[in-house]
Image: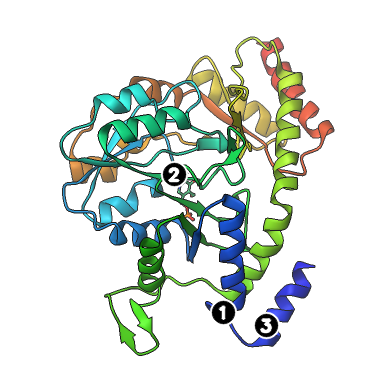
Amino acid sequence: MIDRRILQVVKGGNYILGPECKAFESELAAYFGVKHAVLSSSWTAAVHLLHIAQNLKSGDEILVPSLTAFPSIEPMIHVGAKPIYCDIDDTYTIDLADAAKRITKKTVGILPVHLYGRPVNVDGLLKLAKDHGLWIIEDCAQSHGAKWKGHRLGSFGDHAAISFYPSKNLTVYGDGGAILTNDPEIARQVTMLRNHGRKDKYLHEKIGFNLRFNEIQAAVGREQLKVLDELNAGRRRAAQWYRRELAGTKGVVLPPADSAETESVYHMFVIRLDNHDVRESLARHLKEQGIETGVHYPVPNHLQPAIEDQFGKQPALPKTEDYVKRILSLPMFPSLTEAQVVAVSNAIKGFFSRK
Ligand SMILES: Cc1ncc(COP(=O)(O)O)c(C=O)c1O
Protein backbone atom coordinates (compact mmCIF):
# COMPACT_ATOMS: atom_id res chain seq x y z
CA MET A 1 0.00 0.00 0.00
CA ILE A 2 2.73 2.45 0.99
CA ASP A 3 4.71 1.60 -2.16
CA ARG A 4 1.64 2.33 -4.27
CA ARG A 5 1.05 5.65 -2.53
CA ILE A 6 4.68 6.70 -3.03
CA LEU A 7 4.47 5.91 -6.71
CA GLN A 8 1.23 7.86 -6.96
CA VAL A 9 2.90 10.94 -5.46
CA VAL A 10 5.95 10.60 -7.69
CA LYS A 11 3.72 10.42 -10.75
CA GLY A 12 1.70 13.40 -9.53
CA GLY A 13 4.79 15.62 -9.85
CA ASN A 14 4.05 17.67 -6.73
CA TYR A 15 6.88 17.24 -4.24
CA ILE A 16 6.66 19.74 -1.40
CA LEU A 17 3.87 21.27 0.69
CA GLY A 18 1.15 19.96 -1.58
CA PRO A 19 -2.15 18.18 -1.04
CA GLU A 20 -0.58 15.22 0.81
CA CYS A 21 1.01 17.57 3.36
CA LYS A 22 -2.26 19.45 3.78
CA ALA A 23 -4.21 16.25 4.31
CA PHE A 24 -1.58 14.86 6.70
CA GLU A 25 -1.76 18.07 8.74
CA SER A 26 -5.56 17.84 9.00
CA GLU A 27 -5.41 14.17 9.93
CA LEU A 28 -2.72 14.77 12.56
CA ALA A 29 -4.73 17.62 14.09
CA ALA A 30 -7.83 15.42 14.23
CA TYR A 31 -5.91 12.48 15.71
CA PHE A 32 -4.27 14.55 18.44
CA GLY A 33 -7.41 16.56 19.17
CA VAL A 34 -6.07 20.02 18.28
CA LYS A 35 -7.07 22.64 15.73
CA HIS A 36 -3.77 22.88 13.84
CA ALA A 37 -0.80 20.70 12.97
CA VAL A 38 2.05 22.30 11.01
CA LEU A 39 4.62 20.00 9.43
CA SER A 40 8.31 20.76 9.27
CA SER A 41 11.49 18.87 8.51
CA SER A 42 11.94 17.55 12.10
CA TRP A 43 10.76 18.07 15.69
CA THR A 44 13.82 20.25 16.21
CA ALA A 45 13.01 22.42 13.19
CA ALA A 46 9.33 22.68 14.10
CA VAL A 47 10.08 23.74 17.68
CA HIS A 48 12.71 26.23 16.55
CA LEU A 49 10.04 27.89 14.41
CA LEU A 50 7.55 27.67 17.26
CA HIS A 51 9.95 29.41 19.67
CA ILE A 52 10.50 32.18 17.11
CA ALA A 53 6.74 32.54 16.70
CA GLN A 54 6.40 32.71 20.50
CA ASN A 55 8.80 35.67 20.48
CA LEU A 56 11.08 34.23 23.12
CA LYS A 57 13.54 36.80 24.43
CA SER A 58 17.15 36.44 25.37
CA GLY A 59 17.36 35.36 29.02
CA ASP A 60 13.88 33.81 29.15
CA GLU A 61 14.03 30.68 31.29
CA ILE A 62 12.31 27.43 30.38
CA LEU A 63 11.89 24.49 32.74
CA VAL A 64 12.82 21.20 31.11
CA PRO A 65 13.79 17.76 32.40
CA SER A 66 17.46 17.04 31.94
CA LEU A 67 16.73 13.41 31.06
CA THR A 68 15.62 13.76 27.45
CA ALA A 69 17.08 13.74 23.96
CA PHE A 70 19.50 16.66 23.46
CA PRO A 71 17.28 18.20 20.73
CA SER A 72 14.59 18.99 23.33
CA ILE A 73 16.73 21.95 24.42
CA GLU A 74 18.54 22.99 21.22
CA PRO A 75 15.82 25.20 19.72
CA MET A 76 15.35 27.25 22.89
CA ILE A 77 19.09 27.88 23.11
CA HIS A 78 19.20 28.96 19.46
CA VAL A 79 16.66 31.69 20.19
CA GLY A 80 18.57 32.91 23.26
CA ALA A 81 16.46 31.31 25.99
CA LYS A 82 17.97 29.37 28.88
CA PRO A 83 17.05 25.79 29.73
CA ILE A 84 16.56 25.29 33.46
CA TYR A 85 17.12 21.63 34.12
CA CYS A 86 14.79 19.74 36.43
CA ASP A 87 15.10 16.37 38.09
CA ILE A 88 12.86 13.39 37.33
CA ASP A 89 10.57 11.29 39.48
CA ASP A 90 10.18 7.51 39.38
CA THR A 91 8.20 7.69 36.13
CA TYR A 92 11.36 9.12 34.47
CA THR A 93 9.41 12.29 33.67
CA ILE A 94 9.80 15.79 35.13
CA ASP A 95 9.57 16.04 38.92
CA LEU A 96 7.05 18.85 39.23
CA ALA A 97 7.95 19.66 42.85
CA ASP A 98 11.58 20.08 41.80
CA ALA A 99 10.50 22.17 38.80
CA ALA A 100 8.43 24.47 41.05
CA LYS A 101 11.52 25.23 43.14
CA ARG A 102 13.40 26.42 40.07
CA ILE A 103 10.88 29.06 38.99
CA THR A 104 12.22 32.63 38.96
CA LYS A 105 10.99 35.98 37.62
CA LYS A 106 12.53 35.03 34.28
CA THR A 107 10.66 31.72 33.89
CA VAL A 108 8.27 31.89 30.95
CA GLY A 109 7.44 28.30 30.12
CA ILE A 110 7.82 24.62 30.68
CA LEU A 111 8.71 21.92 28.18
CA PRO A 112 7.75 18.58 29.73
CA VAL A 113 8.76 15.39 27.92
CA HIS A 114 6.49 12.35 27.88
CA LEU A 115 9.61 10.22 27.96
CA TYR A 116 9.60 6.62 26.76
CA GLY A 117 5.91 7.08 25.81
CA ARG A 118 4.79 7.60 29.42
CA PRO A 119 2.61 10.63 30.15
CA VAL A 120 3.84 13.17 32.68
CA ASN A 121 1.43 14.00 35.50
CA VAL A 122 -0.72 16.25 33.32
CA ASP A 123 -2.99 17.55 36.10
CA GLY A 124 0.03 18.56 38.18
CA LEU A 125 1.67 20.10 35.13
CA LEU A 126 -1.38 22.19 34.24
CA LYS A 127 -1.69 23.40 37.83
CA LEU A 128 1.98 24.38 38.03
CA ALA A 129 1.74 26.28 34.74
CA LYS A 130 -1.48 28.02 35.74
CA ASP A 131 -0.24 28.99 39.21
CA HIS A 132 2.85 30.64 37.73
CA GLY A 133 1.51 31.94 34.41
CA LEU A 134 3.75 29.68 32.32
CA TRP A 135 3.10 28.34 28.85
CA ILE A 136 3.53 24.62 28.14
CA ILE A 137 5.02 22.92 25.09
CA GLU A 138 4.53 19.15 25.36
CA ASP A 139 7.43 17.20 23.89
CA CYS A 140 5.48 14.33 22.33
CA ALA A 141 8.40 13.02 20.25
CA GLN A 142 8.15 9.66 22.04
CA SER A 143 4.48 9.56 22.93
CA HIS A 144 2.30 9.58 19.81
CA GLY A 145 -1.10 8.26 20.85
CA ALA A 146 -0.42 7.99 24.59
CA LYS A 147 -3.31 9.18 26.74
CA TRP A 148 -4.03 11.02 29.95
CA LYS A 149 -7.54 10.42 31.30
CA GLY A 150 -8.61 9.09 27.91
CA HIS A 151 -7.35 12.05 25.87
CA ARG A 152 -4.30 11.93 23.65
CA LEU A 153 -1.21 13.81 24.76
CA GLY A 154 -0.39 16.86 22.67
CA SER A 155 -3.71 18.54 23.37
CA PHE A 156 -3.08 19.57 26.98
CA GLY A 157 -0.34 22.19 26.66
CA ASP A 158 -0.48 25.50 24.82
CA HIS A 159 1.44 23.75 22.08
CA ALA A 160 3.08 20.39 21.45
CA ALA A 161 5.51 18.87 19.00
CA ILE A 162 5.93 15.43 17.48
CA SER A 163 8.83 13.76 15.68
CA PHE A 164 8.75 11.21 12.87
CA TYR A 165 12.41 10.20 13.28
CA PRO A 166 12.68 6.59 12.03
CA SER A 167 12.72 4.99 15.50
CA LYS A 168 9.58 6.80 16.64
CA ASN A 169 6.08 5.33 17.06
CA LEU A 170 4.88 7.24 13.97
CA THR A 171 7.30 7.35 11.05
CA VAL A 172 7.58 8.74 7.52
CA TYR A 173 10.57 6.98 5.91
CA GLY A 174 12.94 9.74 6.96
CA ASP A 175 13.10 12.82 9.18
CA GLY A 176 10.08 14.96 9.94
CA GLY A 177 8.09 16.60 12.67
CA ALA A 178 5.20 18.92 13.40
CA ILE A 179 3.85 21.34 15.93
CA LEU A 180 0.36 20.91 17.32
CA THR A 181 -1.56 23.93 18.55
CA ASN A 182 -4.98 25.45 19.01
CA ASP A 183 -3.58 28.93 18.40
CA PRO A 184 -4.30 30.02 14.81
CA GLU A 185 -1.73 32.83 14.88
CA ILE A 186 1.07 30.51 16.04
CA ALA A 187 0.08 28.03 13.31
CA ARG A 188 0.12 30.83 10.73
CA GLN A 189 3.53 32.09 11.84
CA VAL A 190 5.11 28.62 11.82
CA THR A 191 3.57 27.92 8.42
CA MET A 192 5.18 31.11 7.09
CA LEU A 193 8.52 30.67 8.83
CA ARG A 194 9.09 27.15 7.47
CA ASN A 195 8.73 28.51 3.94
CA HIS A 196 10.97 31.61 3.84
CA GLY A 197 8.49 33.74 5.77
CA ARG A 198 6.22 33.76 2.74
CA LYS A 199 2.77 35.22 3.03
CA ASP A 200 2.16 34.34 -0.58
CA LYS A 201 4.35 33.37 -3.50
CA TYR A 202 6.20 36.68 -3.88
CA LEU A 203 5.53 38.37 -0.53
CA HIS A 204 7.71 37.71 2.52
CA GLU A 205 6.25 38.85 5.82
CA LYS A 206 9.08 37.39 7.91
CA ILE A 207 12.70 36.37 7.55
CA GLY A 208 12.18 32.64 7.47
CA PHE A 209 13.83 29.37 6.63
CA ASN A 210 13.51 26.44 4.30
CA LEU A 211 12.28 23.83 6.76
CA ARG A 212 9.48 22.45 4.61
CA PHE A 213 7.99 18.97 4.47
CA ASN A 214 7.57 16.85 1.39
CA GLU A 215 4.76 15.05 -0.32
CA ILE A 216 6.21 11.54 -0.47
CA GLN A 217 6.84 11.47 3.26
CA ALA A 218 3.42 12.97 3.98
CA ALA A 219 1.82 10.16 1.99
CA VAL A 220 3.81 7.62 4.02
CA GLY A 221 2.84 9.38 7.26
CA ARG A 222 -0.84 9.30 6.34
CA GLU A 223 -0.68 5.54 5.89
CA GLN A 224 1.29 5.09 9.12
CA LEU A 225 -1.17 7.25 11.06
CA LYS A 226 -3.97 4.86 10.08
CA VAL A 227 -2.18 2.01 11.84
CA LEU A 228 -0.59 3.96 14.72
CA ASP A 229 -3.07 2.71 17.34
CA GLU A 230 -2.54 -0.84 16.17
CA LEU A 231 1.25 -0.44 16.30
CA ASN A 232 0.99 1.07 19.79
CA ALA A 233 -1.17 -1.87 20.86
CA GLY A 234 1.69 -4.14 19.76
CA ARG A 235 4.11 -2.20 21.97
CA ARG A 236 1.70 -2.31 24.91
CA ARG A 237 1.25 -6.06 24.46
CA ALA A 238 5.01 -6.59 24.43
CA ALA A 239 5.30 -4.47 27.60
CA GLN A 240 2.78 -6.73 29.36
CA TRP A 241 4.77 -9.82 28.35
CA TYR A 242 7.95 -8.25 29.73
CA ARG A 243 6.13 -7.46 32.98
CA ARG A 244 4.85 -11.02 33.28
CA GLU A 245 8.21 -12.59 32.48
CA LEU A 246 10.38 -10.28 34.57
CA ALA A 247 8.04 -9.89 37.58
CA GLY A 248 9.92 -10.52 40.79
CA THR A 249 13.35 -10.72 39.13
CA LYS A 250 15.66 -9.55 41.89
CA GLY A 251 17.83 -6.66 40.76
CA VAL A 252 15.46 -5.51 38.01
CA VAL A 253 13.14 -2.54 38.51
CA LEU A 254 10.42 -2.53 35.85
CA PRO A 255 9.05 0.70 34.37
CA PRO A 256 6.15 2.03 36.45
CA ALA A 257 2.86 0.45 35.38
CA ASP A 258 0.14 2.72 34.04
CA SER A 259 -1.92 4.55 36.64
CA ALA A 260 -5.68 5.05 36.36
CA GLU A 261 -4.98 8.23 34.39
CA THR A 262 -2.28 7.08 31.97
CA GLU A 263 -2.09 4.96 28.87
CA SER A 264 1.57 4.65 27.86
CA VAL A 265 2.69 3.74 24.35
CA TYR A 266 6.08 2.25 25.27
CA HIS A 267 8.30 4.03 22.83
CA MET A 268 10.87 2.27 25.01
CA PHE A 269 10.77 -0.35 27.74
CA VAL A 270 13.37 0.77 30.24
CA ILE A 271 14.47 -1.31 33.22
CA ARG A 272 16.68 -0.13 36.06
CA LEU A 273 19.49 -2.12 37.59
CA ASP A 274 21.29 -1.87 40.93
CA ASN A 275 24.30 0.00 39.63
CA HIS A 276 26.36 0.97 36.60
CA ASP A 277 28.54 -2.16 36.63
CA VAL A 278 25.53 -4.47 36.62
CA ARG A 279 24.00 -2.45 33.77
CA GLU A 280 27.16 -2.70 31.69
CA SER A 281 27.71 -6.42 32.28
CA LEU A 282 24.04 -7.26 31.66
CA ALA A 283 24.17 -5.31 28.37
CA ARG A 284 27.31 -7.25 27.41
CA HIS A 285 25.71 -10.57 28.39
CA LEU A 286 22.66 -9.80 26.24
CA LYS A 287 24.80 -8.67 23.32
CA GLU A 288 26.68 -11.98 23.41
CA GLN A 289 23.30 -13.63 22.86
CA GLY A 290 22.49 -11.35 19.95
CA ILE A 291 20.18 -9.06 21.97
CA GLU A 292 20.74 -5.33 21.39
CA THR A 293 19.97 -2.91 24.19
CA GLY A 294 20.42 0.84 24.54
CA VAL A 295 20.69 3.58 27.14
CA HIS A 296 18.38 6.57 26.86
CA TYR A 297 20.27 8.57 27.89
CA PRO A 298 23.69 7.91 29.41
CA VAL A 299 24.62 11.63 29.71
CA PRO A 300 21.81 13.92 30.88
CA ASN A 301 21.66 17.30 29.19
CA HIS A 302 22.78 19.37 32.18
CA LEU A 303 26.08 17.43 32.07
CA GLN A 304 26.67 17.67 28.32
CA PRO A 305 29.93 19.41 27.38
CA ALA A 306 28.13 21.81 25.03
CA ILE A 307 25.95 23.01 27.91
CA GLU A 308 28.82 23.44 30.35
CA ASP A 309 30.73 25.35 27.64
CA GLN A 310 27.88 27.78 27.05
CA PHE A 311 26.25 28.11 30.47
CA GLY A 312 28.89 26.87 32.93
CA LYS A 313 28.48 24.09 35.46
CA GLN A 314 24.84 23.31 36.14
CA PRO A 315 23.28 22.44 39.51
CA ALA A 316 23.31 18.74 40.43
CA LEU A 317 20.20 16.63 39.78
CA PRO A 318 20.60 13.65 42.12
CA LYS A 319 17.95 11.28 40.78
CA THR A 320 18.73 11.95 37.13
CA GLU A 321 22.46 11.48 37.73
CA ASP A 322 21.83 8.23 39.60
CA TYR A 323 19.31 6.73 37.16
CA VAL A 324 21.29 7.41 33.98
CA LYS A 325 23.95 5.04 35.28
CA ARG A 326 21.44 2.26 35.86
CA ILE A 327 18.82 2.37 33.09
CA LEU A 328 18.74 -0.06 30.19
CA SER A 329 16.34 -0.01 27.23
CA LEU A 330 15.24 -3.49 26.18
CA PRO A 331 14.20 -4.38 22.63
CA MET A 332 10.80 -2.77 21.96
CA PHE A 333 8.94 -2.52 18.67
CA PRO A 334 5.34 -3.21 17.60
CA SER A 335 5.96 -6.60 16.01
CA LEU A 336 7.95 -7.99 18.95
CA THR A 337 6.61 -11.51 19.54
CA GLU A 338 5.84 -13.23 22.81
CA ALA A 339 8.61 -15.75 22.07
CA GLN A 340 11.14 -12.94 21.58
CA VAL A 341 10.11 -11.27 24.83
CA VAL A 342 10.38 -14.60 26.66
CA ALA A 343 13.84 -15.15 25.15
CA VAL A 344 15.09 -11.68 26.19
CA SER A 345 13.58 -12.12 29.66
CA ASN A 346 15.13 -15.58 30.06
CA ALA A 347 18.50 -14.15 29.08
CA ILE A 348 18.10 -11.47 31.77
CA LYS A 349 17.02 -14.01 34.40
CA GLY A 350 19.90 -16.27 33.34
CA PHE A 351 22.33 -13.40 33.93
CA PHE A 352 21.08 -12.89 37.47
CA SER A 353 20.92 -16.59 38.37
CA ARG A 354 24.52 -17.12 37.26
CA LYS A 355 25.81 -14.22 39.39
C1 LIG B 1 12.18 13.45 23.42
C2 LIG B 1 12.65 13.94 22.09
N1 LIG B 1 12.55 15.25 21.78
C3 LIG B 1 12.95 15.73 20.60
C4 LIG B 1 13.50 14.89 19.64
C5 LIG B 1 13.97 15.50 18.35
O1 LIG B 1 13.28 15.00 17.26
P1 LIG B 1 13.84 15.19 15.76
O2 LIG B 1 14.92 14.16 15.59
O3 LIG B 1 12.63 14.93 14.89
O4 LIG B 1 14.32 16.57 15.64
C6 LIG B 1 13.59 13.53 19.89
C7 LIG B 1 14.14 12.58 18.90
O5 LIG B 1 15.32 12.48 18.71
C8 LIG B 1 13.19 13.03 21.15
O6 LIG B 1 13.28 11.73 21.45
- Going by the numbered disc 2, the residue's amino acid type is Glu
Q: Which mark is residue 201?
A: none
Q: Which mark is residue 10?
A: 3
Q: Residues within 10 Å of mark 3 (few under 14, many from 20)?
A: few
Please, which colouring scheme is shown? rainbow
- Going by the numbered disc 3, the residue's amino acid type is Val
Image location of residue 20, percent across then percent down: 62, 74
- Quadrant of the rendering where the N terminus is positioned: bottom right
Q: Residue 138 carries which label?
A: 2
- Can you see residue 91? yes
How far apart in space, not on screen, are marks 2 and 1 (Cα)? 27 Å
Q: Is residue 73 left or right of residue 290?
A: left
- Quadrant of the rendering where the C terminus is positioned: top right
- Can you see residue 294? no
Foreground residue among 276 and 167: 167
User: What's the residue at 41%, 21% (across, down)?
Assistant: 322
